[in-house]
Amino acid sequence: MIEVVCNDRLGKRIKVKCLPEDTVGDFKKILSLQIGTNAEKIVLKKGYRIFKDHITLDDYEIHDGTNIELYYS
């Protein structure tokens, strides 16, 4: 189990617990339950890289304590 921190640049920081084998799409579903936003409207970035839904968190090298930027489309 890892804990990933999502920052929405408006002052809200959300901590999400998930597995490294989860896909980004699964992570968005867990995150959407916590913030009350539709999962399809969530865009996750780190730097200039936009995370794609079908790739696992482990493949993106997202580990415990990683910070991800949260945007809304």
Image (tube, rainbow, N blue to C red):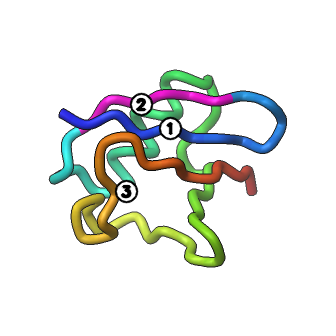
Question: Up-down: is 41 above or below 13?
Answer: below
Disc number lying in front (1 or 2): 1
The residue identified by callout 2 is 16
The residue identified by callout 3 is 24
Mark 1 residue type: Val
Mark 3 residue type: Val
Quarter of the image where one finds residue 38: top right
The residue identified by callout 1 is 5
User: Few, some or many C-alpha atoms within 10 Å of disc 3 (few <14, some 14-19, many ≥20)?
Assistant: many
Q: Residue at x 73, y 50 (%)?
A: 72
- In the foreground, 14 or 63: 63
Residues at discs 1 and 2 in contact (Cβ within 8 Å): yes
User: Few, some or many C-alpha atoms within 10 Å of disc 1 (few <14, some 14-19, many ≥20)?
Assistant: some
Judged from this view, the residue extending furthest toward the bottom is 48
Disc number lying in front (1 or 3): 1
Question: What is the magenta range?
Answer: 13-18
Question: Up-down: is 64 above or below 69?
Answer: above
Question: Up-down: is 53 above or below 9?
Answer: below
Q: Residue at x 56, y 76 (%)?
A: 49
- In the foreground, 47 or 27: 47
Spatial CA distance of label 2 from label 3 is 12 Å
Task: Work out whether mark 1 precedes mark 3 in sequence or the reverse, and give the earlier one.
Answer: 1
Residue 62 in picture, x, y percent from top left? 34, 57
Q: Residue at x 50, y 38 (%)?
A: 5
